[in-house]
Amino acid sequence: MDYDSYVHNQTVVHGQIEKPPQYHEAERKAIDHLFRDIPKKSRILDVGCGSGLGMKYLRELGYQSVEGIELHPEKARIAGAYFGDVATFSFRHTYDLIYCSHAFEHMYDPHAALLNMKAIADGFIFILPYVDTGDPVAHLASFEIGTRVDDAGETVNNWFTSRGLILIEKAFSKLREPEIWLRYAI
């Protein structure tokens, strides 16, 4: 798939602006768990922030330095986030933590995305559908990163650790759908 077709697919075909209500509560519960020991002064980037649900909740919890980046122009506008592709975006500063919920499996070039993310942060939280049964065209990176392999998350974890990340925590949830929660450091 060429890049223009990818962007069209992500923003027009699969560009739903509002998530179902149960998604909101599940996002809050995931953040409550995964951010339980993250200092409130941390500078956070929400990658694939959508319309800003995660960003808004993090701010409600007291995180004051929360930004986002989103490929969908209308979602980026609603969220007050950067508009662009995290794989090629030129960030002006660094972050303590990148939060990426149900977005990394959508990457056009997950390796390039992770390289750019590693250049600006040293902590990472990924929430990914697992075992991923989503639309393979929308979840373009799911095959490369291993979220479609039912092996207790070993393949997906190996994908990240073979690129220099150090696993801190791996957990599984069914709050929204079956998913894997991963925390990493460099």
Image (cartoon, rainbow, N blue to C red):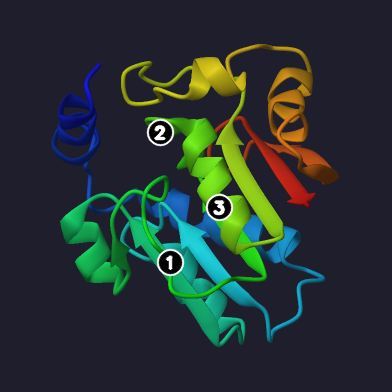
The x, y position of residue 42, in whole percent, is 67, 79
Q: CA distance from mark 3 to mark 1?
A: 10 Å
Q: Earlier in the sequence, mark 3 or mark 1?
A: 1
Whether residues under marks 2 and 3 lie with C-beta atoms below 8 angstroms apart, the answer is no
Above or below residue 132? Residue 55 is below
Residue at the spot of label 1? 91
Above or below residue 75? Residue 138 is above
The x, y position of residue 179, in whole percent, is 62, 34
- The disc placed on residue 3 is none
Tell me what residue is drawn at x 32 percent, y 69 percent: 81
Residue nearest the observer in this picture, 141 or 40: 141
Residue nearest the observer in this picture, 26 or 128: 128
Horizontal side of 20 relative to 54 (left or right) equals left
Q: CA distance from mark 2 to mark 3?
A: 15 Å
The x, y position of residue 112, in whole percent, is 48, 37
Mark 1 residue type: Phe
Locate the N terminus and report the quarter of the image it occupies.
Answer: top left
Q: CA distance from mark 2 to mark 1?
A: 20 Å
Query: To which quarter of the image does residue 127 belong?
Result: top right
Mark 2 residue type: His
Pointer 2 local density, CA inside 10 Å: few below 14, some 14–19, many at least 20: many
Residue at the spot of label 2? 106
Mark 3 residue type: Met
Q: Of tags 2 and 1, which is closer to the observer?
A: 1
Q: Secondary structure at mark 2?
A: helix
Horizontal side of 51 relative to 39 (left or right) equals left
The x, y position of residue 40, in whole percent, is 70, 84
Tell me what residue is drawn at x 75 percent, y 49 percent: 183
Residue at the spot of label 3? 117
Residue nearest the observer in this picture, 183 or 84: 84
Q: Can residue 178 be seen in the rendering of this structure?
A: yes
